[in-house]
Image (spheres, rainbow, N blue to C red):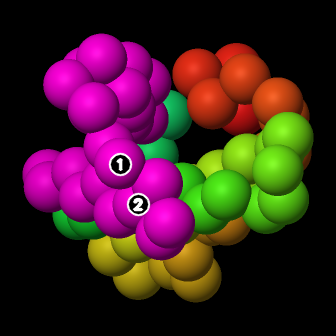
């Protein structure tokens, strides 16, 4: 399984990368055949971040989750 972390207008630090990899690494126990997890982090406005997580699973449609929060780790 591969985990990609993409930052748009955001510098992805090591702590952000480690947090995303820890959260994304838990997904295969819920979804058999998980191939790819992509986190896209975007600065929504001056105070908020938007995080989208796309989980690519074999023989199934992609699972997509979105979150907005002022704290990038909480999102």
Q: Where 1 falls versus 74 (above or below)?
A: below
Residue tagged 2: 7
Q: Nearer the viewer, residue 19 or 10?
A: 10
* Residue drawn at x 27%, y 32% as measured from the top left: 13
Residue 24 is situated, as x and y percent measured from the top left of the image, at 38, 35
Q: Position of residue 22 (x, y in %)?
A: 32, 19
Q: Is residue 45 above or below residue 17?
A: below
Viewer-closest of 32 and 15? 15
Instruction: Please say if the residues under marks 2 and 1 sit with CB atoms less than 8 Å apart.
Output: yes
Residue 37 shows in this picture: no
- Residue located farthest toward the left when viewing the structure as drawn: 1
Mark-to-mark CA distance, 2 and 1: 6 Å
- How packed is label 1: few (under 14 Cα within 10 Å), some, or many (20 or more)? few
Q: Which residues are magenta?
A: 1-27
Residue 36, disc: none
Q: Nearer the viewer, mark 2 or mark 1?
A: 1
The residue pinned by badge 1 equals 11
> Vertical placement of 57 versus 3: above or below?
below
Is residue 23 in the magenta section? yes
Task: Find residue 19 and report its image quarter.
Answer: top left
Lateral position of residue 36 relative to residue 65, left or right:
left
Q: As displayed, is residue 23 above or below residue 44? A: above
Residue in the picture at 79% in, 61% down: 44
* Nearer to the camera, 20 or 8: 8
């Amino acid at each position: 399984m591969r985990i990609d972390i993409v930052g748009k207008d955001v510098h992805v630090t090591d702590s952000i990368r480690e947090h995303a990899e820890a959260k994304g690494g838990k997904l295969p126990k819920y979804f058999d055949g998980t191939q790819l997890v992509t986190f896209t982090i975007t600065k929504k406005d001056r105070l908020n971040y938007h995080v989208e997580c796309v989980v690519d699973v074999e023989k199934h449609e992609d699972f997509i989750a979105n979150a907005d929060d002022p704290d990038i780790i909480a999102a």
